Image (spheres, rainbow, N blue to C red):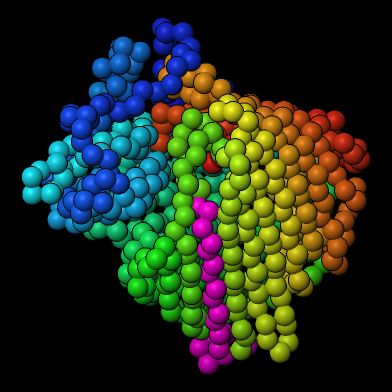
Amino acid sequence: MPGRILAASLALWLAAEALAQTDALPALGEAPTLAATPTFAELEARGARIGEIIIDAQDIFDLDDPRENNMLFRAANALHIRTRPDVVRRALLFKPGDPLSVRVVEETERLLRDNPYLYDVVIRPVQLHEDGTVDLEVVTRDTWSLKPDVSYGREGGVDTGSISIEERNLLGTGISVSIGRVKEIDYSGTEFALSDRHAFGGWTEVNYVYSDLDTGHRNALSVAQPFYALDTREAAGVSAFDGDRIASDYRAGEIVSQYHHARRTLDVFAGRSAGLENSWVQRFSVGYNYDSNAFSLDPTRDPPERLPEDYDLSGPYFRYELIQDDVRRVRNFDQIERPEFFDLGFRTTAQIGRALESLGATRDSWIYKLALSDGATGSGGQVLLANAAVSGRYDELDSRRQLSAEARYYVPRGSTSLFYASVSGAVSKSPDIYDVLQIGGDSGLRGYPLRYQTGDRRFLATLEQRIYTDYFPFRLFRVGGAVFFDVGRAWGGDFDPGDAEQGWLADFGFGLRILSARSAFGNVIHIDVAFPAVTGPNIDSAQLLVKSRTSF
């Protein structure tokens, strides 16, 4: 089967004796308490405090369930190293002696579920004592976290793939490590990655990536303690990048020129917050950013008509964040039979910086970023999410900016069907060819070649009818489908369009969605067939797309 499907899970699929199951995954075991145990809301109203915290880190398959108690699933449990209880404990936002808070319990569950090595999370009260303290139990179920992977993808007429080995929960510690050969649209080579969200026993995140590619190399390192929760009061971090690559300029789905781009960056920041107050959070950060970019021709490749100008940015910045606490739990929106959390509160991030020649910048410049997002709900579970962003650089000799906006609309039709619509647009004002906006293949319009149209403006709209089945073959995979329609275009700017058809383009098609539910790599595999409504040079009558994505 194409796509990124865990090899071990595929072996289970091929060898399993059971027929496909249609019933849902059972909930984690019943709480060992009396039925009269109050709810979290009732306990908070009573002013209860947290007593003992019991961590029950469970295996991948529930052997107490006859549907999961077979030889292959027992072998998977035996080979898998279960998540260590202290890994779960250090991710909790509460500790013994704290006042019980429903909001903190719910936010803790969301943070735990964000770890790919956990499939399910339940937090529940297990015993209420006479002194008003309540003991809590945190029950988790693991995913299969080892992936010896041979994968394949196809999008916009271009093949991609990889041969790698990746472990998302090394020895049960929550550390992720991977190494392998990759072939993406723009490059191929060897990559090594290491990530730990709870380094040094706390909330310090460490990430490192090294890539040795046919187009260059990349070294990226970051160490940070972020604003990991709404009530986090302090944050700080540093990140650095050193790399070079061959940048490609596309026209009508074909590469027309290439050039060399070397980049080095350094970012250091520190932030403060008063925490969550009346459902709102304000955060203030200051930092320093260095960004050096150099462009050169490669004598073995076709040169562009003009080469981007070298530039260095170096200087301080100030960042402000405003966040409204409003998170809703849904199911069967962007995943299949998995809890999802939509942030419907208003959020904004504004950053202003100054690049200074005295600190090594090419020239004095203002650098700015602004991002906004919000959400709303309607009758019948409808959800509308919208976001917009603008960023740019301004000085006496040059002004460049990019504006983008997107809206997503979800209309549930029962528990297994949903209508989805999205619209997005972008405008770029820049003299550099690497700031071009493109559409086709991986950048939208599934029925057309990769990066088919080019311009400084882009618009894309998508309509989908999604189906979420309860088909759960071998208790390993979730299955869904979609019928879709796309319309959009990229246009404008001082760019040669090549042989691409100009004007509005549209396509329609259908596809299969497969979620590898029991693995830590549970992306949704898309297998789509798309038919273009407009024909022209280099446009096939149908496009087959195979891609692993994070959502439906």
Residue drawn 58% across the image and 52% down it: 376
Which sits in the foreground, 118 or 166? 118
Q: Is residue 158 visible?
A: no
Which sits in the foreground, 109 or 501? 109
Residue 290 pos. (x, y %): 51, 77
Residue drawn 73% across the image and 87% down it: 397
Residue 479 pos. (x, y %): 55, 24
Residue 156 pos. (x, y %): 73, 40
User: Is 170 drawn above or below residue 225 in the view shown?
Assistant: above
Q: Is residue 140 left or right of residue 54?
A: right
**Picture quarter containing residue 303?**
bottom right
**Picture quarter containing residue 419?**
top right
Can residue 202 be found in the magenta stretch?
Answer: no
Region of the chain picked out in magenta, as a range: 343-363
Residue 275 pos. (x, y %): 35, 68
Can residue 358 be found in the magenta stretch?
Answer: yes
Q: Is residue 324 visible?
A: yes
Q: Pick the quarter of the image with the C terminus.
A: top right
Q: Pick the quarter of the image with the N terminus.
A: top right
Residue drawn 70% across the image and 73% down it: 401
User: Is 484 drawn above or below residue 347 in the view shown?
Assistant: above
User: Is 333 drawn above or below residue 289 in the view shown?
Assistant: above
Residue drawn 40% across the image and 23% down it: 25
Q: Is residue 479 left or right of residue 542?
A: left
